[in-house]
Image: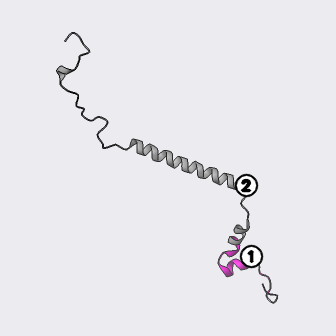
Amino acid sequence: MSIDTPPITPQQYEVLHGGGAEAAEIAQQRLSRRRFLRRSMLTIWGLSTTASVAGALYMLYPNLAGQFGAALTVGKKSGLSSSCQTE
């Protein structure tokens, strides 16, 4: 600021510059330890929740490789030993 111009209030600055005073105040604030820990914990919680949901959806989505419930070739019936001896 030059010496000739009178100081302006934050409200006047905001009107003149389109919301710059509030943004400047937010930028001047330091990131406290509590805020950092809170944000990091929320980030980790969000990432783990996202991974859990993605894993559950991947597990529930049908596998089209024909592994579960597919027809198995075992051989002839005469080649198999029966569990019931009365037959």
**Disc 2 from disc 1: Cα separation:** 28 Å
Q: Residues within 10 Å of mark 1 (few under 14, many from 20)?
A: some
Does 47 appear in magenta?
no
**Residue, far front:** 79
Q: Which mark is residue 33?
A: 2
| Residue 87 to residue 22: above or below | above
Give left or right: position of 9 versus 72. Answer: right
Q: Judge whether 19 appears above or below 65 on screen.
A: below
Quarter of the image with the C terminus is top left
* Disc 2, SS: helix
- Using residue 5 as the reference point, say whether residue 58 is left or right of it: left
User: In the depicted view, which residue is nearer to us: 31 or 12?
Assistant: 31
Residue at point 23%, 28% (across, down): 74
Q: Position of residue 84 (x, y in %)?
A: 24, 13
- Residue at 39% over, 42% down: 60
In front of the other: 55 or 65: 65
Picture coordinates of residue 59 (x, y %)? Answer: 41, 42
Residue type, mark 1 in image: Pro
The outermost residue toward the right is 3
Q: Position of residue 22 (x, y in %)?
A: 69, 71
Q: Is residue 12 magenta?
A: yes
Span colored in magenta? 5-22
- Where's residue 69, x and y in %? 29, 34
Q: Residue at x 17, y 20 (%)?
A: 78
Closest to the camera, between mark 2 and mark 1, is 2
Q: Secondary structure at mark 1?
A: helix
Q: How is the image coloured?
A: one colour
2 or 1: tag closer to the N-terminus: 1
According to the picture, the residue beneath numbered tag 1 turns out to be: 10
Question: Residue at position x 71%, y 60% from top?
Answer: 31
Could you tell me if the residues under marks 2 and 1 are in contact, i.e. CB atoms within 8 Å? Answer: no
For badge 2, the amino acid type reads Arg
